[in-house]
């Protein structure tokens, strides 16, 4: 059985390793995309504009309220359809496919972004009002205040929550396997179906996912320490 | 920041859209699952192999077309065809009335009866029935065979794979405690574990499982079941608008069946002749 997981043309080791790289790529870019959206929508939610607030509320309610798989199906099959429809108007006939990687990143990023929005909003609200007032008193411009005073504090408060979002995002990437993108889940499905050894390959998938989560745990721990300089960390 | 550069380069490459033009059929894109041994699967080198891959290459040579294979998960294999990701599905897909509502099919290139299996030692293993059950045949003998099956399976748990002709058959003809599985492999494991009393599937896939250590204790019972809602066999799925492509496949399949190519390929992979 062990020859099945060797590297090279006789074993699945290299394929599985590549699929892990794909999972890492797709989940980190989804998280990054999600954080970007999250920051934007969190500021919408905290703004004074009724319209912006409603837009952000609409987004987080919808995306957090429907199954992740549905969002992926909608973007993958619906997205290509929409692009082809637009291309047709401009006279281009034929098939255009957005790569499963792009669609997957957008779909999982949109899901991850909805959760990040709430985490970031909570973190901004947790920064004491006095910090904003003190920065203004010192004559700081809005931009300088956001980046030099507020952001480091938001980062410290948001990191534990973002760590959670990261884990969810990582696991959501398994759903992209339906689009044919060869990440850990899809690769272990292929290997299981081709060798009739589902138990072996799904166990390996578990180990690969756990490997990524334990490495990222270390990373988040370090980041939390970095942003918590000057604070006594409670818990662990 | 070398790692950052590598990362961004990878991202840019990955997000480029692929692009294809419809038109003449000198180039045909064949969609397959690549995880359904021995029909279509992936070897450890990551290459697509299997009976349908060999057959597709042969058919393409007959049609003087260049074939390109596209891998797609089974969930979504029909929507991706309709969407245009590839032109043909060759993925062990049975021709059924239900699927014909969405896509059209070439004539069947391989046929294989459905069969039930159970563990050796189960009372079902010694059940005696007619050898064949043709669902197109409405005779009393057919009804008797179905009656025998229902009596034997009364109160027992029967496994089928979701969205297959086998599930349709079980719903229409059998009165059992039906357990529906997403994949054949999960059903196989539960059959070996005794979590279901019997399984209904293509005879070939379960035969492959019987060859593995965990499947050694599995055996067939009951008749070969075919015809009616079990469909005509396994065919190539084609978009409804592409009647010209369907005609090309029908002609090539008829030639391959006539000159023994399909028989040779199926014997190589299934150990028996599945030519229609």
Image (cartoon, coloured by chain):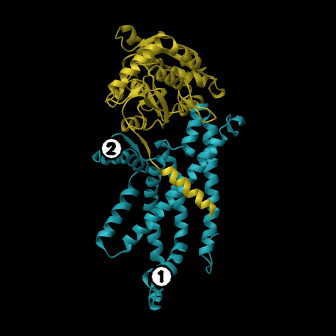
Chain colours: A cyan, B yellow
Which element type, helix, strand or loop, lies under badge 1? helix
Name the residue located 47 percent from the left edge and 82 percent from the top edge.
Answer: A145
Looking at the picture, tell me which residue is in the foreground, B102 or B82. B82
In percent of width and height, residue A126 lies at 47, 77
- Left or right: residue A10 versus residue A110 is right
**Badge 1 is on which residue?**
A144
Q: Which mark is residue A92?
A: 2
Which element type, helix, strand or loop, lies under badge 2? loop
In percent of width and height, residue A234 lies at 61, 74
Q: Chain of mark 1?
A: A
Residue B180 can be seen, yes or no: yes
Indicate which label's residue lies in the foreground, 2 or 1. 2
Residue B5 drawn above or below residue B260 = below
Counting residues from the start of the chain, the first of labels 2 and 1 encountered is 2
- Left or right: residue A5 versus residue A122 is right
The single residue placed furthest to the left in the displayed view is A89
Dot 1 alpha-carbon crowd within 10 angstroms: few under 14, some 14 to 19, many 20 or more: few
Q: Chain of mark 2?
A: A
């Amino acid at each position: 059985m062990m020859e099945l997981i060797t590297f090279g043309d006789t074993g699945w080791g290299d394929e599985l390793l590549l699929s892990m790289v794909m999972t890492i790529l797709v989940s980190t870019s989804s998280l990054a995309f999600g954080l970007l959206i999250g920051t934007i929508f969190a500021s919408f939610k905290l703004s004074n504009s009724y319209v912006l607030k409603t837009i952000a509320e609409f987004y987080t309610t919808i995306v957090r309220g429907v199954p992740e798989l549905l969002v992926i199906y909608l973007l993958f099959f619906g997205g290509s359809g929409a692009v082809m429809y637009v291309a047709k108007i401009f006279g281009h006939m034929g098939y255009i496919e957005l790569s499963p990687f792009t669609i997957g990143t957008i779909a999982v990023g949109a899901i991850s972004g909805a959760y990040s929005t709430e985490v970031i909003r909570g973190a901004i609200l947790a920064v004491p009002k006095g910090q904003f007032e003190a920065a203004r008193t010192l004559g700081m411009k809005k931009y300088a205040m956001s980046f030099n005073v507020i952001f480091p504090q938001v980062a410290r408060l948001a990191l534990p929550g973002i760590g959670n979002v990261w884990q969810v995002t990582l696991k959501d990437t398994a759903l992209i396997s339906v689009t044919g993108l060869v990440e850990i889940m899809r690769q272990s499905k292929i290997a299981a179906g081709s060798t009739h050894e589902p138990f072996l390959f799904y166990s390996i998938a578990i180990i690969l996912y756990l490997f990524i989560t334990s490495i990222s745990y270390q990373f988040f721990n370090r980041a939390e320490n970095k942003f918590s300089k000057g604070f006594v960390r409670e818990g662990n | 920041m070398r790692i950052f550069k590598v990362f961004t380069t990878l991202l840019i490459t990955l997000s480029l859209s692929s692009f294809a033009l419809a038109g003449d059929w000198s180039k045909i894109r064949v969609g397959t699952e690549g995880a359904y041994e021995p029909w279509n699967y992936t070897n450890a080198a990551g290459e697509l192999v299997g009976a349908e891959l060999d057959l597709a290459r042969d058919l393409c040579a007959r049609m003087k077309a260049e074939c390109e294979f596209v891998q797609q998960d089974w969930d979504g294999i029909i929507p991706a065809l309709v969407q245009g990701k590839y032109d043909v599905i060759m993925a062990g897909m049975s021709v059924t009335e239900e699927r014909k509502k969405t896509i059209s099919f070439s004539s069947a290139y391989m046929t294989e009866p459905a069969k039930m299996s159970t563990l050796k030692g189960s009372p079902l293993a010694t059940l005696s029935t007619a050898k064949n059950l043709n669902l197109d045949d409405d005779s009393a003998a057919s009804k008797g065979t179905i009656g025998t099956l229902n009596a034997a399976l009364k109160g027992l748990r029967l496994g089928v794979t979701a969205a297959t002709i086998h599930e349709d058959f079980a719903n229409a003809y059998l009165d059992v405690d039906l357990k529906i599985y997403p994949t054949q492999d999960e059903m196989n494991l539960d059959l070996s574990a005794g979590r279901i009393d019997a399984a209904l599937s293509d005879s070939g896939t379960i035969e492959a499982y019987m060859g593995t250590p965990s499947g050694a204790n599995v055996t067939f019972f009951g008749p070969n079941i075919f015809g009616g809602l079990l469909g005509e066999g396994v065919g190539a799925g084609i978009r409804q608008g592409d009647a010209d492509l369907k005609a090309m496949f029908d002609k090539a399949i008829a030639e391959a069946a006539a000159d023994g190519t399909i028989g040779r390929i199926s014997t190589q992979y299934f150990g028996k002749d599945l030519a229609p």
